Amino acid sequence: MSRIFNASSVWVGVVGALLVAGVGAARVPEQDPAVVNAKNVKVTLDNPRVRVMEATLKPGDKEQMHSHPAYVVYVIAGGTVRNHAADGTTSETTFVPGQTIYREPITHWSENIGTTTIRTVVIELKSQ
């Protein structure tokens, strides 16, 4: 019994230390939009407070599943996009140039279902 207790205590200590160090909040590479969608997403700034990316989706382009912490989208060139959430739900949005949108954390992928190339600046907010 003490062996199980000690193993559990060690596990709880390791998980706690990782969370305090911020490791538990880290994005895994297969969910990083700049990694899985390197063809469409370019990181322009990455510091301890924010990560800024330029994203371009041509008509018919589809992203791979990825995750964002809370983030802001600024639309440079608009169009119609269909978002596919990790839970299987979908939604459609028409982006308008100059539009600024705040979004809560999400795991999703998007596809350009319109006839114009969509260009956005995505600003991911990092926890302090």
Image (cartoon, rainbow, N blue to C red):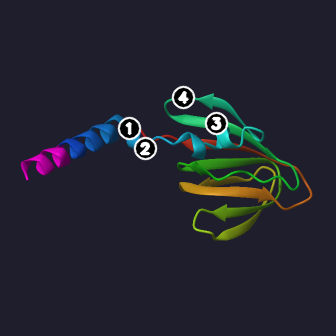
Write down the residue under mark 4: 47
Q: Is residue 71 magenta?
A: no
Q: Nearer the viewer, mark 1 or mark 3?
A: 1
Q: If you read the primary sequence from the N terminus, does the residue marked by circle 4 or circle 1 appear first?
A: 1
Label 4: element kind: loop
**In x, y percent, where is residue 109?**
68, 56
User: Residue 101 appears in which quarter of the rendering?
Assistant: bottom right
Query: Please, is residue 120 above or below residue 110 in the view?
Result: above
Residue contact between numbered discs 2 and 1, judged by CB atoms under 8 Å: yes
Query: Please, is residue 94 above or below residue 4 in the view?
Result: below
Q: CA distance from mark 2 to mark 1?
A: 6 Å
Write down the residue under mark 3: 52
Q: CA distance from mark 1 to mark 3?
A: 20 Å
Q: Residue at x 74, y 53 (%)?
A: 99
Q: CA distance from mark 4 to mark 1?
A: 15 Å
Q: Amino acid at mark 2?
A: Ala
Write down the residue under mark 2: 25
- What are the residue bounds of the magenta stretch? 1-9
Residue contact between numbered discs 2 and 4, judged by CB atoms under 8 Å: no
Please give left or right for residue 7 compared with residue 18 in the image. Answer: left
Q: Residues within 10 Å of mark 1 (few under 14, many from 20)?
A: few
Q: Specify the label residue 22 is tagged with.
A: 1
Q: CA distance from mark 3 to mark 2?
A: 18 Å
